[in-house]
Image (cartoon, rainbow, N blue to C red):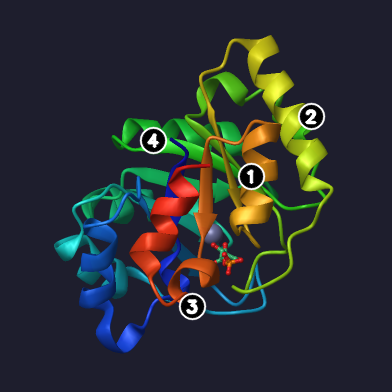
Amino acid sequence: MTQIAPSMLSANFGSLDADVEMVNNSDAAMIHLDVMDGQFVPNISFGFPVIEAIAKKARKPLDAHLMILEPDKWVDTLARLGVETMNVHWEACTHLHRTVQAIRAAGMKPAVTLNPATPVEFLRDIITDVDMVLLMSVNPGFGGQKFIPQILDKTRRLRQLISESGSRALIQIDGGVNLETGRQLVDAGADILVAGSYVFNSPDPAGTIASLARL
Ligand code: DX5
Ligand code: ZN
């Protein structure tokens, strides 16, 4: 089974509890939380009070994708809120090694995200320290964008880098995932697929999660 991480960015914020409950009762492996600061990306989404509300209801692990500058400032806050995976952007971290160690020391799983134009080779010296690598398959900031097909080759190159290094990092892909792109991504070596609009805009979100999980 492919691990699926529904992105709450596309949930209905007027009835968040219901959408969290849908994910709890689905085949989802984790809950993907997209935090945006209006600086690192051209959009603002939600912050700690919303994560806290979701954490109270969630029965799946929380996967926080931080599209923010200086994510190091919030390691302790996210650990306190019960986040399992703290995912920081390579492009937002001047001292990535220090940030990754701080996340681990706080009891969370460290993960690193690459924007579409950042090569996987830049991870060579950190790959054995992280539990997950997220490849963005759209430019971060918005749900509902079109999948960038070059990410398929990038996924294969990341898979190779991981096996050469002996790292146990999982490969997660985020942006424009649907049954068609998801199939291609799994064939290319992806372990975890993030899906926002494809899940929440479908008439049967839990059924859509189940069909992605069967890829
Ligand atoms: C984009 C976010 C994604 C987004 C994906 O910046 O990181 O997680 O919610 O949305 P879809 O699946 O609609 O492309
Ligand atoms: Zn995301």
Q: Earlier in the sequence, mark 4 or mark 1?
A: 4
Residue receiving disc 1: 183
Tell me if label 2 and label 3 are in contact, CB under 8 Å: no
Please, what is the three-letter code of the amino acid marked with disc 4?
Answer: Lys
Q: Residue 201: in sight, yes or no?
A: yes
Q: Position of residue 172 (x, y in %)?
A: 56, 42
Q: Name the residue tied to disc 2.
A: 121
User: Residues under labels 4 and 1: Cα distance?
Assistant: 27 Å
User: Is ligand 1 closer than 8 angstroms to the Cβ of mark 2?
Assistant: no
Other-residue count near label 2 (Cα within 10 Å), few / some / many at <14 / 14–19 / ≥20: few
Compared to residue 11, the image places residue 2 above or below, namely above
Label 4: which residue?
109
| Discs 1, 2 touching: Cβ within 8 Å | no
Q: Amino acid at mark 2?
A: Glu
Furthest residue to the bottom?
14
Instruction: Characterize the local packing of mark 3: few (<14), some (14-19) or many (20 or more) Cα atoms within 10 angstroms.
Output: some
Q: Nearer the viewer, mark 2 or mark 3?
A: 3
Q: Nearer the viewer, mark 4 or mark 1?
A: 1
Q: Is mark 1 within 8 Å of ligand 1?
A: no
Residue at 30% x, 89% y is 14
Mark 4 surroundings: few (<14), some (14-19) or many (≥20) residues within 10 A: many
Instruction: Give the mark nearer the N terminus: 1 vs 3.
Output: 1
Q: Amino acid at mark 3?
A: Asn
Classify mark 4: helix, strand or loop.
strand
Q: Would you place residue 73 above or below residue 168 in this image? A: below
Using the numbered discs, state the Cα–Cα distance from disc 1 to disc 3 in whole angstroms: 19 Å
Q: Earlier in the sequence, mark 3 or mark 4?
A: 4
Quadrant hosting residue 127 = top right
The residue shown at (30%, 66%) is 51
